[in-house]
Amino acid sequence: MDNIAVLDFGSQYSNLICRRIRETNVYCELLPYNTPALELKKIQPKGIIFSGGPASVYFTEAPKPDDNIFQLGIPILGICYGHQLLIDHFGGKVRKTSIREYGQAELTIDNNSDLFSEIQRKIKCWMSHGDSAEELPHGFKILGHTENSFSAAIGNQEQRLYGIQFHPEVAHTENGGQILKNFCEKISHAKPMWNMENFIESAVRDIRIRVGNEKVLCAISGGIDSTTVAALLHKAVNKNLKCVFVNHGLLRQNEEASVIGLLKDYLQTELILVNAEAQFLRELKGVSDPEMKRKIIGEVFAKVFVQVAENNGPFQWLAQGTLYPDVIESGVSKGPASPIKTHHNVGGLPRWLGLKTIEPLRALYKDEVKRVASLLGVPKEILDRHPFPGPGLAVRIIGEVTTEKILIARDASRIVEDELKAAGLYDKVWQAYASVGDDKAVGVLGDACLYGHIVIIRIVESTDAMTADWAKVPYEVIGKMSTRITNEVEGVSWVTYAISSKPPATIEPQ
């Protein structure tokens, strides 16, 4: 299948480039900026994109790609820092600009023959840079400019090398998707063959080849990711699959009963139930650091899986619902960007596990998984549920996980979901919950003073969980949530509403 490779130089938007390209039905993958040319040659990308990044190309330690990439004859598009890399590599000059451009600017297109094909002459674009070109390399022509940047878009059309100072991947750039589509299809000649029907077919084929006649244990939570994995595996290996549901004591209210009923009806495969609440809470006692909590949860899951395999096996494979954002946020891509947080199913599993892992959804974003799930007939009750983290309420509890805070987070989150459903808003937002930490505030309950916990309501809108914005829920709905939480949830005196987007915040607080 034709593909585009994005080299990650540390931009917060690197994943958005992949997302936008996949929306054009061309497969795209994010790779470390220093991926060797020989590795790229093996995957045979039709085009290469250099992402943006926080560095300046004239610094000694600035991240640079393998020089041999430029000898491959593959089209290259540089975005922001990537644009400056092209200028620097081919002998142009980049300098710190006296007039920095951050935010929206008007781009005038001077040449619309390929990269800007089917785009009007003037568009709004999103700028984020403090460096700019002082002198262009030989063979490059100006394709577009802004008031403060004479070379906002450049190209050596004979060698199929292009640079743009702005970010086409963000929603603030008009026709940004069309620009990326033009690079992929018109310049790189990548065929748009990436769709979820093809993915299912290739995933099932790959599972059969890898697993053969061996046995697979699939960790399943009742969420859309693990349920979709189980459905793919059942399609591929049928009776060689068993699923395990682990109650770690950090589930939503009534989660175990409702999930087990749905899964048994849908999957038609053996479902092993394990109650490991005491084991998880014992290991988490006294632990406040969020990274440590995630790693402990991953390790305890591994211990449970090993025990299940010994009692119900033998198994040779452990299947998980790992997604592409899990891999990226855990820093597995090895780009210059820092890891955001370790996902228990990526960085938490120990080397001693003794089971080979199979992760059929590892290359997908959340919205792509939803399309796969729909094609596989996953029940609507699972398909439409809000995402719930694998570590459960542990990542919605700030500081040490205690029984009191578990009850607060669980009961308050149920109220948040109830009120969204009552207002007809549940299906219109991506995720909603309540979290709690160690902060307390004075309140008045009846005639008595209460020094109680502060609960934080978090409701976000998103399409893929890589970026998110806080939901502008009507005040009266938030007011009902607050009233119910302080009246019905013991030990709570205040309720607040989180209005941070992602980035800079993450969706879950821990």
Image: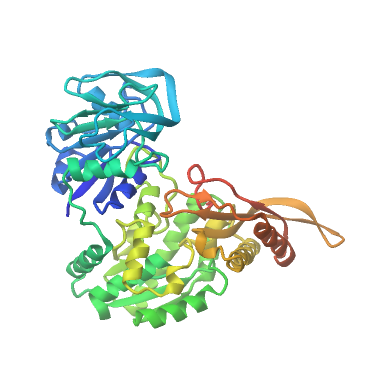
The residue shown at (14%, 47%) is 42
243 is higher (above) or lower (below) than 5: below
Quadrant of the rendered structure where residue 75 is? top left
Q: Quadrant of residue 78?
A: top left
Image location (x, y in percent) of residue 64: 26, 30
Residue at (58, 54) in percent of width and height: 458
Instruction: Give the percent coordinates (x, y) of residue 417.
Output: 58, 65
Which of the 4 image quadrants contains residue 379? bottom left
In the rendered image, residue 434, in percent from the top left (x then y), is placed at 60, 59
Q: Is residue 95 left or right of residue 253?
A: left
Q: In which quadrant is the N terminus drawn? A: bottom left
Q: Is residue 100 left or right of residue 132?
A: right
144 vs 379, nearest the viewer: 144
**Furthest residue in direction right, as rendered:** 447
Q: Residue at x 26, y 49 (%)?
A: 28
Asked if residue 376 is positioned above or below residue 351 in the image, the reply reads: below
Residue 434 placement, left or right of 150: right
Q: Is residue 426 visible?
A: yes
Instruction: Specify whether 57 is left or right of 97.
Output: left
Is residue 58 or residue 461 the one in the foreground? Answer: 461
Picture coordinates of residue 361, whole percent (x, y): 31, 61
Q: Answer whether residue 222 is visible to the viewer in this image.
A: no
Examine the rendered structure and indicate whether residue 274 appears above or below residue 94. Answer: below
Q: Is residue 457 above or below residue 267?
A: above
